[in-house]
Amino acid sequence: MYKTEFDAVVIGSGPNGLAAAITLQQAGLSVLLLEGKSTLGGGLRTAELTLPGFRHDICSAIHPMAASSPFFRTLPLDAHGLEYIHPPVAAAHPFDDGTAAVLASSVEETARSLGADEKAYLNFFKPLIDQWPRIDADVLGPLTFPKHPIDFALFGLKALPPSTWLAHWFKTKQAKGLWAGMAAHSIQPLSNFTTSAIATVLMTAAHLRGWPLPKGGSQQIANALVSYFVSLGGKVETNFYVSSLAQLPSAKAVLFDITPKQLLQIAGHRFSSIYRWQLNRYRYGMGVFKVDWALDGPIPFTAEGCRGAGTVHIGNTLEEIAESERLASKGQHPEKPFVLLAQQSLFDATRAPAGKHTAWAYCHVPNGSEVDRTDAIEKQIERFAPGFRDRILARHTMNTEQLEAHNPNYIGGDINGGSIDLGQLFTRPALRRSPYRTSEGLYICSSSTPPGGGVHGMCGYHAARQALKDLFNQ
């Protein structure tokens, strides 16, 4: 146990824990960051999972929200080793006829590729691109009265409806499919309210700042954040797994980058009965089954647009994707799962030996599923890239149990820190004046708080700002 006192202790070094620690340290506090694993980063970790020389991102891979984060953009992360690479195509969406819809950095280029939906796409996204710099901090934060209420309300009209409703904005299968693949990042049935928010934010981000990948792997984002934190005077300790408040040094504020389940185990005795009841009712969403491959060459996609894309959404039509997500949410394992795939080594030579490549993919599964989805995922890729399996040198798989063992925040394989449906979008993890304050001196700063999952650090930033206001008059 520590003898030294700190102003604040942050538990967990995911992007939100790091953002919280930096925010507190910037304010002149003495901050200790504790991480239970031997490496820092939470979902920002990279390792040789298959063969020597093949570097795979264990969880997050492509980072539109990190590049767009209102907080991360204020930090000198490039001076601490972070370099983003922008693929020529942000994302591609192949169809059975050999064509693909593409999400380009240019909204006009994307619109032109959608044929009959060119005007509809421009009418939908051009106003959002104009509004986003005025509303991004409010969208990526707790529910408060927005600084630009009209712009925020116009965003809400497009963000709150189910994505299956807003798909009617478009006529072509290309535009509808591209939209559905984006909405499926919400990891819930596309018929749910708020699924349009995920698609809207991701596509707007692509047109403003792209969908970049960090050179060297996602671990490089964590390394840059840690390096900056330490340069400010912050302290870090790894292999320090917290299971009790008694383990912690004296501190005025403790911030937890963990989900309600672990928070109850560590500090539940400090909470009111109503708050404990709310946390016990907190709902976790679908899990993921993930596969990484070492490949003998690039994935041989039939559609040319997929060969230059950092991300490929594999699911064919809106209807097929919607059915896949519906079945997984009902506890089933669809024959044709929606697959999110990244091919970082096409643009980053540090990821694989010369002439070789990596691929990263996952599909959604029922929470806690232990079913092996390798064959189903590979069949889906082979469907749009005949000959893919012939290029596999090695593979590494992780089911929901293994993902949770790697990162305890992934309860049942849920990488979003809890379902982000309408019932938990504004009230995660509980209905309170501040979603970050738990009891005196204790705060939760994980993706189980607003604005939810994604590598943006805004949950940690807002939690730290709340602690500064409550305890340090800042």
Image (cartoon, rainbow, N blue to C red):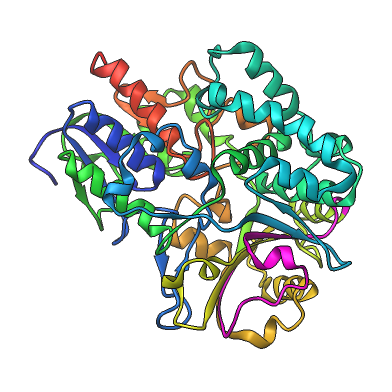
**Bounds of the magenta segment:** 291-319
Q: Is residue 416 above or below residue 137?
A: below
Q: Name the residue: 54% across, 63% down.
A: 401
Residue 392 drawn at (x, y percent):
61, 84
Task: Tell me which corner region of the image, top left, top right, bottom left or bottom right, holds residue 20.
Answer: top left
Looking at the rendered image, the quarter that the C terminus falls into is top left
Q: Is residue 403 above or below residue 411?
A: below
Left/right of residue 390 with respect to residue 330 in the rendered view: left
Q: Name the residue: 36% across, 57% down.
A: 220
The number of numbered badges drawn on the structure is 0
The one nearer the camera, 146 or 107, is 107
Residue 445 drawn at (x, y percent):
41, 34
The one nearer the camera, 112 or 461, is 112
Task: Tell me which corner region of the image, top left, top right, bottom left or bottom right, holds residue 320.
Answer: bottom right
Residue 393 drawn at (x, y percent):
56, 87
The one nearer the camera, 137 or 427, is 137
Left/right of residue 4 with respect to residue 134 in the rendered view: left
The one nearer the camera, 73 or 56, is 73
Q: Is residue 367 above or below residue 149?
A: below
Left/right of residue 37 with respect to residue 297 in the rendered view: left
Q: Is residue 189 visible?
A: no
Q: Is residue 136 visible?
A: yes
Task: Tell me which corner region of the image, top left, top right, bottom left or bottom right, holds residue 189.
Answer: top right
Residue 341 drawn at (x, y percent):
64, 63
Q: Is residue 413 above or below residue 121?
A: below
Queried whether the magenta region covers residue 19, the answer comes back as no
Give the residue at the far left of this rendering: 3
Q: Name the residue: 41% across, 61% down.
A: 215
